[in-house]
Amino acid sequence: MVKAEVPDMSSMGQPVSLTKAAAAAWNRLRRSFAPRSPYRIGDAVVADDPFKGRREGVVVFRQGASVGVDTAHGVFFYDHRQLKQLD
C-alpha cells in the first residue's frame, strides 16, 4: 500500500531539553491527582439535579469531573457527584 504522506525525517531523533522533559513529567503527575469520574462510557446512570431535574440515561462523555449523559431529551452535562448507578 502506498502512503500519500511521508513523515519528515529531519524531526525524528531530535534531542529533548531537560526543561521540556521535566515539564511533561510534572504535568503527568499533576493530572494523576486531578478529580476523575468513576463512571465509564456506556454506564446506565440516574442524574439528579435540582435545576435540570431527575433524568435517566447513558454516559457518553467523560472529562475530569464532568460527565455527559445521553437521555431521551438530549445530552446533559453533570458533575459526577450528582450521578448514581441505575439498578
Image (cartoon, helix red, strand yellow):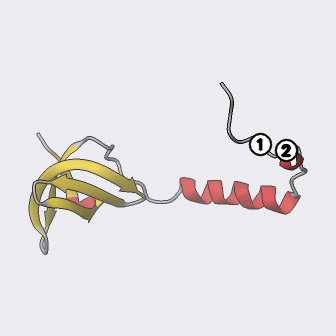
Is 7 or 45 nearer to us in this picture?
7
User: Does residue 17 appear left or right of residue 65 in this picture?
Assistant: right
Q: Judging from the image, what secondary structure is the residue with disc 1 in? A: loop
Mark 1 crowdedness (10 Å alpha carbons): few <14, some 14-19, many ≥20? few
Residue 12 tag number: 2
Where residue 83 sits, quadrant-wise, is bottom left
- Check the image and name the residue furthest to the top: 1
User: Where is the C terminus found, in terms of image quarters?
Assistant: top left
Mark 1, residue position:
7
Residue 57 percent across, percent down from the top left: 16, 50
Q: Residue at x 28, y 57 (%)?
A: 68
Where residue 20 sits, quadrant-wise, is bottom right
Q: Residue at x 85, y 50 (%)?
A: 11
Is 32 or 19 nearer to us in this picture?
19
Q: Are marks 2 and 1 in contact (CB under 8 Å)?
A: yes
Mark 2 crowdedness (10 Å alpha carbons): few <14, some 14-19, many ≥20? few
Q: Earlier in the sequence, mark 2 or mark 1?
A: 1
User: Where is the N terminus found, in terms of image quarters?
Assistant: top right
User: Does residue 66 appear left or right of residue 1 in this picture?
Assistant: left
Q: Residue at x 88, y 58 (%)?
A: 17
Task: Report, in whole angstroms, how far the alpha carbon at label 2 lies from the one at label 1.
Answer: 9 Å
Is 45 or 14 nearer to us in this picture?
14
Residue 65 percent across, percent down from the top left: 38, 60
User: Does residue 17 appear left or right of residue 73 in this picture?
Assistant: right
Residue 8, placed above or below residue 77: above
Residue 44, placed above or below residue 69: above
The kind of residue on which mark 1 rests is Pro
The kind of residue on which mark 2 rests is Met
Residue 58 percent across, percent down from the top left: 21, 47
User: Does residue 35 appear left or right of residue 70 in this picture?
Assistant: right
Q: Judging from the image, what secondary structure is the residue with disc 2 in? A: loop
Q: Residue at x 26, y 49 (%)?
A: 59
